[in-house]
Amino acid sequence: MRYSAEHKQETRTRVIAAAGQVFRKEGYGGAGIDALTKAAGVTNGAFYGHFKSKGEAFRTAVLVGLEELRQGIAALKANQPKDWLTTFVGYYLGYKRTCELDESCALPSLSPDVMRADDETRNAYTEEIKRLVEEVAAGLQEGAIQGQSGPRREDRAILLLAMLSGGVTLARAVSDPALSERIADVIAQAALTVMEPGN
């Protein structure tokens, strides 16, 4: 039976979404093809009709996850131009810290596996990170990181993403809810302080 192009695209979208959830929850090494196909509700044949390998599915899931983050930031900046950063930091260290792991942000949950991935995946990831940094930087005021001279919005964007991603990683990893909350609070305060121009 031949499927329409629309049906194929819907299936691909479903497989990518399921793969992103499985990879976030299980990691690349813990996610087999069977788990990916089961989560997507497709056969192995349907999976391989969209991806040549598990690695290609992982790469696609990572890129889609980072693009979703970039688009979310762009939407926040458009809808809340004056206080997008405070809202973003609160959401990231709140909901994205406490949601189910399979719904977590791709940046902290998938980056560790990218470090061990093939060059094609790492190169594609690098390009998406550059786009993400540009998106964040475009929403920051001019100003330098303390001790540096000149406008360094891109540097502050990198610092913000690293602080939030690292903070979420630490806060998710600890078993003590009070410590998790404390980590989130400390990171939120530091992130917003550093993002102010002239600090």
Image (cartoon, rainbow, N blue to C red):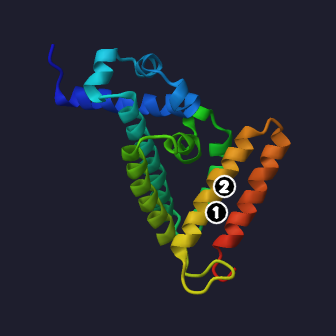
Above-or-below relation of 44 to 105: above
The residue tagged 2 is 90
Q: What residue is pinned by disc 1?
A: 86
Q: Position of residue 132 (x, y in %)?
A: 46, 59
Disc 1 + disc 2, Cβ < 8 Å:
yes
Question: Residue visible at 53% across and 28% down?
Answer: 29
| Helix, strand or loop status at disc 1 | helix
State left or right for residue 42 relative to residue 138: left
Q: Is residue 186 visible?
A: yes
Instruction: Report how far apart the C-alphas of labels 1 and 2 lie in the structure.
Output: 6 Å
Q: Which residue is pictured at 80% across the width and 35% down the height?
A: 175
Secondary structure type for disc 2: helix
Q: Residues within 10 Å of mark 1 (few under 14, many from 20)?
A: some
On screen, residue 88 versus residue 137, left or right, reads right
Work out which residue is located at the far left of the displayed protein and give it: 2
Q: Is residue 149 left or right of residue 180?
A: left
Question: In screen coordinates, is 149 left or right of 199?
Answer: left
